[in-house]
Image (cartoon, grey):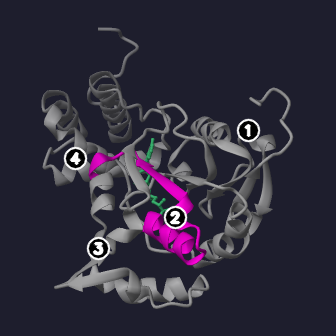
Amino acid sequence: MDPESPSHDDIGEAALTDIELELFVRAMQRRHGYDFSQYAPASLLRRVRQLANSLECGTISGLTSRTLHQPELLPRVLEGLSVPVSDMFRDPRVFRALREQVLPILASYPRIDIWQAGCAHGEEVYSLAILLEEAGLYERSHIFATDLSTRALQHAQEGIYPAREAQQWSRNYIATGGTRSFADYYSVRYNLLKIDKRLRRNVTFAQHNLVSDKVFCEAHLVLCRNVLIYFSNPLQSHALALFRDSLVRGGFLCLGLRESTDFATTAADFDPFDEPQRIYRRSIHPAAGSKA
Ligand SMILES: C[S@@+](CC[C@H](N)C(=O)[O-])C[C@H]1O[C@@H](n2cnc3c(N)ncnc32)[C@H](O)[C@@H]1O
């Protein structure tokens, strides 16, 4: 044994956890091709621990072993690592800005393609669909809704949520400037609220990994909110480069309220449009060195 390396007794608990996390990340990459090495470590560790607990693995190493030997667990593991928390019209002021400032500009395009990356359980997809419907733009729009987690996508596609959310979501809808009744868009059965399937008619749900997959579509609006916060700075820059390459010139990018393009290598490719609501436009002028 290398006399320099620590013995079992003097290695601290935190160092052991670091090793376990590193081995788990490596196992996910080599066994399943999912690379979490550039996720912010503190929140990744929290989710890995929660997952190990909920699958009753005892330790992160136990989870690593099951991830390696039970490939059928993968959708469950991906779901555990993602944080599919969302809301209809989450941060209503953002959706108000989309309704009042962005959609009137998008209305000038004959066809409107929207990429919603990290759609989780679909609440934002249906919120957007409602805005498009009310602006009379839905028929010529298409929403490509993507996420890493296949289980989250399945949930999004079903559009079924706890009915107890209805009141809050109705308040959010009104705060976006909605003038109809939010209840027009769903039906309730027992304690579940089911989104009207009309809102799904121009939506495509698909798995897409912002870490390893290529540009998904040509888009006039990319909405990716509360996903970049889980990424390291270089990975944020990578995702923003995908969005830039996806957007037509002058196309819109909408990020989460705690996210921005400021520190990305691609910052110069985006111009602020409504900065407090984190809405940007792909620059009309190519930045030096960027793709035309
Ligand atoms: C907190 S939710 C955000 C949901 C919604 N956009 C919102 O703001 O309410 C984060 C979502 O990002 C997804 N995600 C995490 N890493 C991803 C990746 N590499 N590629 C695509 N989606 C990812 C997760 O699966 C999760 O559904």
Ranked by sequence position, the earlier of labels 2 and 1 is 2
Residue 82 lies in magenta, yes or no? Answer: no
Identify residue for label 4: 76
Mark 4, secondary structure of its residue: helix
Instruction: Please name the residue that numbered disc 1 is placed on.
Output: 266
Q: Which mark is residue 246?
A: none
- Local crowd size for mark 2, using a 10 Å CA cut-off: few (<14), some (14–19), many (≥20): few
Residue at (36% x, 85% y) in the render: 166
Q: Nearer the viewer, mark 2 or mark 4?
A: 2
Disc 3 residue type?
Tyr
Q: Earlier in the sequence, mark 2 or mark 3?
A: 2
Looking at the image, is 23 positioned above or below residue 246? above
Identify the element where label 1 is drawn. Answer: loop
Q: What segment is highlighted magenta in the picture?
A: 123-151
| Position in image of residue 6 (x %, y %) | 35, 22
Q: Earlier in the sequence, mark 1 or mark 4?
A: 4
Q: Which residue is mark 2?
A: 139
Q: Quadrant of residue 140?
A: bottom right
